[in-house]
Image: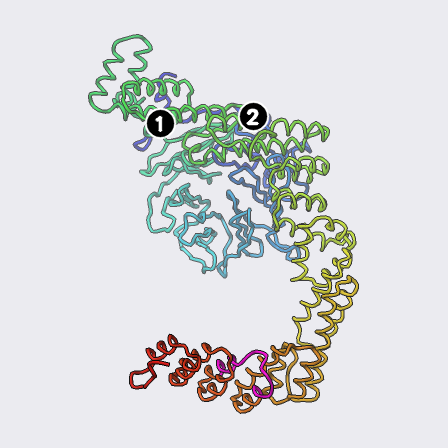
Amino acid sequence: MDNPSLTWNEFDRYFYEKHDFYQMEWEDIDLSNYIVSASRFGGLLALILDDSKVIQINSVSVKHRIFIYTSSGVLISQIDYGNKKVKGVGWTLDERLLVVYEDCSVMIYDIFGEIIKTVLMTQEKDQELVYRTVVWENGIVILTKKDRLLVIESMDDPKIMEYTLPLKLGAVTAMEIILPFFTFSGHTEVLISTLDNRLYILAEKSEPLEIELDEGIVDLVISPTGKLLAYYTTSGSLYVVSTDFEKNYLKFNCNTKGSPKQISWCSGDTVLLNFEKNNLLLMVGPSQSYLQYYYYEPIHLVTEIDGTRIISNTKCEFLRKVPEVIVPIFQLGVSSPAAFLYDASEAFLNVTSKGDETIRMILKNRELTLAVDNCLEAAGHSFSPEIQLKLMRAASLGKTYLDGYYHDDFGIMAKDLRVLNQVKTFDIGMCITYTQYKKMGVGLLIERLVNRRFHYIALKICECLAESKDRVLVRWACDKVKSSGSDEDILNSIVSKLGKEKGISFASIASVAYSEGKKKLAIKLLDHENSASQQVPLLINMQKPERALIKAIESGKADLIYLVLLHMINDPDYSEEKLFGIIQNKKIAINLFVKYCKKKDPGFLIKLYSELKQPTKIGLFKIVESYQTNDFNEIMKLRNVSSMAFSSSKNTFFKKMTDENIKFLNFQKQLEEKTPLKVIGHTINETLTILIKREYYKEAKRLKKMFSVPNERFWWVKMKALASKHRWKELFDFANNEKSPIGYEPFVDICIQNSVSDQALKYIPKIKEPITKVKYYLKLKKFELAADVAISQKDQTLLDDIRNRAPKNLKIPHNI
């Protein structure tokens, strides 16, 4: 078609168009007999027989099944749900199917009917049944027949919240939700209308907000923006209000018999009502204008962000407000820079001079950049590949006249159109618009393609848009693992395609292989995994801890080695002997195991040392352990064990030291039994100090002799002990009792430290070195005594130095 505006309908100051996407592939489908649930963004359809209707079905294969179709009516799978009763069906954004059953169980399926997850909304013992439910893209609201309102906001992390219902809830006529990102609370709000002309707004941890209405609500639906609410009443009127009910935007009397089967939003502020019994699709605008479409077959409406998908028995259509950028290009009788550029491009094709003249006119008006941009954007929004090509050709022509034009925009749009036109093909059946494509993002589009096993198309799109191919390749490999064929063939196929790719997670592929019961294949796949952090946990789950330990040690990561060791310790299949046998030749594993046991399980460590025939380590560990208790008997027990261990290892040094320590402990124990002293836990020096301070000289001498305390050390200890008690006379007698093995300088120092100069002077004459005597005399300001030493030594230089230090009033001799 040369001009798409020929199919437009002017409505409420805007233009609307209805585009045929597909003639449906399915046969013998009468939508009036089915409940239909559609995935947003041109996604899949789920059909299930409507058991509220009396239908003559001869085929058993149709009963108790959910049928999954593309938007082009191509059957993907059938899900047999047995004898359960389905109360609600919905889709997540990545096209997982949520099915709510009457018994309050929720099952999540992939598009081929594999169960991904099961969630129980209530306990089985409660025997609650679902009365009504609303399913949205990742959540569920259930109203039970026992008047409980249960909400899950994320099926990825299914936490069940219970909302407070009004005390007397009338018969419910409709239920709808406002998504969390549209509410002030950040949580889902639930709207419930009742037969007694009331509407309740329910939120978590809030009392119900009650709104009294003039008439009862039959059905209600929130707009895609979350700002508007459309509802249909018992009197046949359509209302549009703000979701806070502060503003009334529309009241429209439909003047039709019966209630609509469906209400849907179309392009923001327009409402569609599907009166199936009247074969009528009624479109109502914000200014009360309306447009009627007649269908002579049942239809199902799917609200999209930029329009409405219309599914019928025979075709899939899309009704939308014509994007504003397209209107001035194709609207008859309207001129715009983009329209001029489009005409100029067509003129160039027809080899006329008008094209160049037109472009120069646009350029002169400084509107060529705008014209190019508008043609590019219009190409994205156009359904027809032919029109897309013409608009892209016009944009390409225009940008050749522009210096400094950002050409990347043209390339990006060209790639986007390639992607859109590819996924909209009949076989794939994704009828997405440019607006939806930009909203959903490339990531979600690729995820949907991969979920449908269009791996090749997904890879080509990744290459076209310079996106990472990793997840596509991994998903292809996972699907390959699930296929029939020998392990060897599957492995070779995967490795040949993915072996040279960087960043591929072979562990995730191996995990799928293991879950499919292909254990040998899983292990072989793991050998190609470069990340030990992914290898090791999976090997543990696969009951291959010994292989996991080798991989963990090769990685050098202590946390992974600990992970494997802890698994083995807690695994009943691994006896102590088996565990020790596995790690005995692995030094890093032994070291980490020892470190763990020291903190968590000392007994296990002793068993390890015994198994490894390392008695010295047993002895040392018992010594350390003995310092961690205050119980004397326990200490002695541990020290004796150490002694025996050192004896077994023939370590004479450790044996002698331990036996000496045991002997000393016994000495201390006897002291405590005979005296009021508390000495256990103190060293020999400390024990000597205590004995001397408390005047137990006999015991001190016995201790000195028993443990061969060197005389020099004994003198140091006794000197410090007596000085600390200020027993100066006793200290002087001790120093004079025999020749000091430590000299007399320490006696002078300790007296000076205790500020007893008179006592210090007693020891200076005993010092041999004259210069040391002078140093101490000067320190004590005894200049005359210092001078006497210098004179006695006939040291003139020393005498001169003393005189210079002395106060002037002291008469220090000038000459010797």
User: Where in the figure is residue 217, as x and y percent of width and height?
Assistant: 44, 48
Confirm whether the magenta stretch covers residue 539. Answer: no
Q: Is residue 787 above or below residue 164?
A: below
Of callouts 1 and 2, which one flags the residue occurring earlier in the amino acid sequence?
1
Kindly identify the residue that appears in the image at 60 percent across and 77 percent down: 713
Q: What residue type is labelled 1?
A: Glu
Which image quarter is the N terminus in? top left
Q: In this view, does 211 lie above or below 638?
A: above
Label 1 neighbourhood size at 10 Å, few (<14), some (14-19), many (20+)?
Answer: many
Extreme-top residue of the structure: 351
Q: Can you tell which quarter of the image residue 615 is in?
A: bottom right
Q: Which residue position holds label 2?
A: 456
User: Where in the figure is residue 175, as x and y percent of width and height?
Assistant: 49, 48
Q: Can you tell which quarter of the image residue 456 is in?
A: top right
- Residue 104 is left or right of residue 243, and the answer is right
User: Where in the figure is residue 337, as x and y percent of width and height?
Assistant: 26, 23
Distance of label 1 from label 2 (alpha carbons): 28 Å
Q: Which amino acid does label 2 sit on?
A: Tyr
Q: Is mark 1 on a helix, strand or loop?
A: helix
Q: Which of these two is toward me, 213 or 519?
A: 519
